[in-house]
Each structure stands twice: as C-alpha cells, then as structure tokens.
Image (cartoon, rainbow, N blue to C red):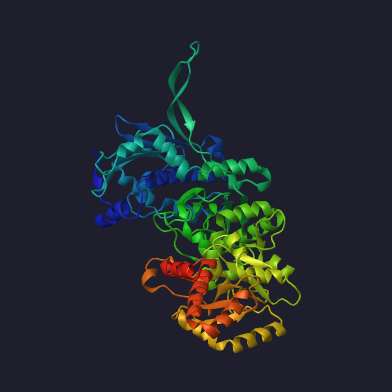
Amino acid sequence: MAEKKQFQTESKKLLDMMINSIYTHKEIFLRELISNASDALDKLYFRSLTDTALGVNRSDLVIGIELDAAARTLRIADNGCGMTREELENNLGTIAKSGSFDFKRDNGASEDVDIIGQFGVGFYSAFMVADRITVETRAVGSSEAWRWESEGVDGYTVEPCDRALPGTLITLHLKDDTEDEKYTDYLQEFRIRELVRKYSDYIRYPIRMEVETSRPKEGSEGEYETLREVQTLNSMVPLWKKSPSEISEDEYATFYREKFYDYEKPAKTVHVRAEGLATYEALLFIPSRAPYNYYTTDYEKGLQLYSSGVMIMEKCADLLPDYFGFVRGLVDSADLSLNISREMLQHDRQLKVMAKAIEKKIRTELEKLQSSDRAAYESFFDAFGLQLKFGLYSDYGMHKDDLKELVMFRSSEVQEGQKYVTLKEYTLRMKEEQKTVYYACGETVDKIAHLPQVESVRARGYEVLYLTDDVDEFALQMLMEYDGKKFANVCTEKLDIETEQEKETVRRQNEDAGELLTHMKEALGGAVTAVRFTGTLGDHPVSLSSEGGLSVEMEKVLGKMPGAETGAAKATLVLEINASHPVADKLRALYENDKDKVADYAKILYAQARLINGLTIDNPTEISALICGLM
C-alpha cells in the first residue's frame, strides 16, 4: 500500500480556502480541468516543434470526457505531455505550484503556444464536487506511469500504475447529493455539454464525449433507435479569431442570436483587433431592440471576458460605461492580469486601457451608423436613446462631450423621412442672427406643439426642439451649450425673441397696469411670483412661465420621485397674460369698477394656464364655482 504524504504546504486552512472560498461557482471545476488538459497538449506540441522524434500530429491531440453514473465518476483525459513522478509531486503535491508557469518560464513559450494556467490552484477546484480524486499519468518519453490519489486535506499517495500511452487521466469520485447541492448533475450529458459550451467552447483541441443519440430505425417508418456515439462538444475556432473579410453578415448574426439569445439580428456588428498598450480582440454587437428588462434594476451590463479562448467572466461590467450598457459581445485577451481563481480581474492598467478603447470604438461606430443609415440609427435610438441622454446628465456631465453628437430630439422642423434631429442639424439650420437653441417640454409632441409660447416662437420662424423624456431638460442644462449656442426653454420669462420696439411696448403696458397686476398676484395667494403682460403668446390669452433654473417640466419630474410629496422642489411661476388679447382689455376695465371680480378672473386664468402646461389644479371645485358664477 502506498505511503500517504502530506501536502508540502502542510496547511489545511489553505486547502480549505482553495476549495471553499476562492471560486464563486462549483461548476468552474470543469473549466479548470479542461484548461489544464489543454495546457498539457500545448506543451507536447511545443516540444514537438524542436523534437521531431516525438512524431506529434496536432490533429491527433484531444481531450476526452467520460461519465459513469453508476460509479459516480467523471473522467477527463488528454494525450498530452503527461507527468513524471517528480512533476506529479511538484505540481499536485504543492498547492499553488504551477507547472504551466514553470514551462513558460523555462522554455520561452510565447504567442505560438498559449499556456493558460498560471497559479497551480485550478486542479484543487475539483474538490468542490469530488471527495476523492485519482490522477493517472505517464510522461512522454518515459516507460513509467504513476497514480496520484487524494481525498483532500488529509494528504495524498503516489504509486506506480499501468498506462499504455503518454498523457493524463483524472477521475473525480463525486460527492453524494445534499439538499443544497446536486452533484449528480455533473453526471448528466446535457449539463457537461452546457458547461463546455459556456466556458471552454474555444479550447483549440477537440473535447469529445460519448453521448446518447437517436436516429430513424431502418425499415421501420416513424420508429427511432437509441445508440451511443462520440461527439465533439466544442467549436474550437472562435469566430473573432477569423479575419472579418472571411465572415459573412449571416455568420455574425447567427453567432449573435445563439450566443446572446436574441431573435433579431444586431443593428451593428463591430469586430476589433487591437495591439499596443493592450492586445485584445473584441466582437461587439449593438442590439436592434432593448431587452424586456433593460430599463430595470434587474438588467446587468457587461461583456463576456475570455483569456486565450477560455471564458473568465460572464459579464465584465468594467469594460462598458453605463451609457453603452446595451452593447453585447465579448473581449478576448492573453494579456489580462487575472486573480488566483481566474474568475475575476485585477483592476489593472490593461483593463482600463481596453475599456477606454472599446468605449471610443462604440462611439465612433454609432456616429458612422447615424451618418450612413439614418433609419437604422433612429430605430436604435428609439430603443436606447434614453440611456444616451442619461449619459449626458450623469457623473456631473463628465461624458457630455463624448455623447452630444449621438443624442437626438423631436423637433418642429423634422425633415421628411426622419423622426429626430441632432443638435448639429439644428444649429446648421439656425437663422444668422439666432444665438439660442430653443426647446419646449411636455408629455407628447402634440401637446408641446400647442403650447402658446411654442406657437409664438415658431411664428417668428424659429425651430423648437420638443423634449418628451423626463431626462431631456436636465441633460440639456448639463450640456449648457452646443457650438457656442446656449439652450433656452421657450416657457421661461427670459425668452428673448421680441424686437426692441415690442419690448418697449410691453414694458410700458406692464408699468401702466402695475396696480392691476399686483392685485391679481395677491388674489392668487403666493402661487406665482408675478403677473405680467407679454407679447409672446400669439393668439392665446394666458400661459405660465418660470423663473430661475427650475422649469415647470422639471418640477413635474422631481415630483414623481419617491418622497417628493413631502419636499418636492417647486418651480417659480409667473402668470403671463397676452397684452393684445381681449381678455387684457376686459381686466383693465373691470379693475376700475369691480376689483373682486378681477380676483376671480385671476384664479380662473391661473387655473387655465396650469392646464395648458399640464399641471393639476389644486382646488377644481372652487374654479368650477367661479366659472358657473361668471356664466
């Protein structure tokens, strides 16, 4: 009987940590063992490049998986370089001893052979699902074979065994099922196939397993027979490793649908190969539609992250800014600084460099789409434009210069065949003397278009942006200006569209009716800061404008937020009356004879103005009574 040896670290605590703490998901064990097998094949192939006597044919190198439900064993085999007894003890008898790392260091292996393992702990992840592990191995060029066996922290044994060919066979004796863990799942063919496709689909060697299939039975219509056949579980060659010129749009679309479970083809595909400060390949997809949960807290952004074809993270959020969180895809790099479990990245310079480059590439491709296929871009903007506008506003406007060309808005002057205008398009159409980009806010385009101030501004030949999303005005205020042109809400008291003569006329009218306007303001009991005549309402009798930085629409948005009932910010309102409308003459005449009725008129006009601006009336019963009394 072989003598049991203790691990050289002699640290039960360390092994417990390896098994129970480092890895987030138990299923990772299969990725680690397959990666180790791939390393063994890489090492053999690398040696064969200088030692032709080995007679290695790369097409013969393979990884095999075998399941035995009755014995509760899972086997992973490779016909790679194998291990001598010394290598076996060094690599498996010492926790965190990496044979792959030593091989790369001692043999100068570089880009020709991409060795995955670095830390020497991946093998021990198998103890998360197995209570006993047996390793049988024979080194290339050796006539001796060895068996390593361990039940975990109690140590291991090494003894001679029979093995006809070089390579390694690892046998996992799976733990019994518990209420919380069903280890039997790892003996199911579909589960193994799923894990290989998820984590190891692009291992460069075939991963083969005998599986149960069915086929039509010869000579019998409608009957099937069951048989077993060996199938290759992985695709081996990543699509992103091919030259873009060799890939059709249909191939990209099929890959996207299958990989990211979307039934529509992407709006845009971006294939990137980068070298320099960070070397990586990326395959990015801009979806045609938003996922059902995109604008909820359940949605997780992030790109799949691969290291040399092995998936490290399902969603690496650090590779995408929030405003491009809709992008799906993957990044593959051999330069990543991984942590010990290969599940997460160290936050290092390479990751930041890649993230910055990817952000710039996405932005550039979206700008190209906007200019080359306006219909496709507008369809994309319907789905994700809101997120871009949030990006303008978020982080105190840090990203506004990166996103200002991508955002679009509804407008009073939308061109035929288009739904939106860009800020550049608006400014290129501006009148020569115009220094301001005008906008108005509301629930719908139709409601905005019928605002008195909007009709007045349009009547003077100015284009008005129609802001229908809650974030729109906040975003424009954060942007502050575009191409030197400031933004102005047409529903503010500072709207400057009148001629000097018109301004002077309105100034005198307000001065002459000072007592009347003050009386109306007092009748409204502090609801407005002022009542004044204006010449910017066209044919409309009355409207509300706001003073200061908070508009009426911004008040509405803030009022929707949780807790707003107790401390919502309020816009500073001004009741504006059309100085040339008959209602102004009526007010002037009434003030001389019936000041009480003027007060009633003030309340009715204020209620009317609130309705026009989409605000509620605080006391509709009172207004109804006043109207009935006047009738």
Residue 133 occupies quadrant = top left
Q: Name above or below for residue 454 compared with residue 577.
A: above
Where the N terminus falls, by quadrant? top left
Q: Position of residue 78 (x, y in %)?
A: 44, 38
Question: Of 107 and 431, which appears nearest the observer?
Answer: 431
Q: Position of residue 100 (x, y in %)?
A: 45, 51
Q: Please give the name of the residue rendered at 65% of the width and 43% of the height, measured from the top-left corner.
A: 249
Q: Name above or below for residue 69 compared with residue 269.
A: above
Q: Position of residue 535 (x, y in %)?
A: 65, 78
Q: Is residue 354 visible?
A: no
Q: Is residue 307 visible?
A: yes
Q: Position of residue 395 (x, y in %)?
A: 50, 71
Question: Of 289 and 141, which appears nearest the observer?
Answer: 289
Q: Name above or below for residue 88 compared with residue 355.
A: above
Asked whether, in this view, residue 520 is left or right of residue 191, the answer is right
Asked whether, in this view, residue 418 is left or right of residue 391, the answer is right
Asked whether, in this view, residue 47 is left or right of residue 506, the answer is left
Q: Please give the name of the residue rendered at 47% of the width and 46% of the height, measured from the top-left corner.
A: 39
Question: Of 392 and 605, which appears nearest the observer?
Answer: 605
Question: Of 14 and 336, which appears nearest the observer?
Answer: 336
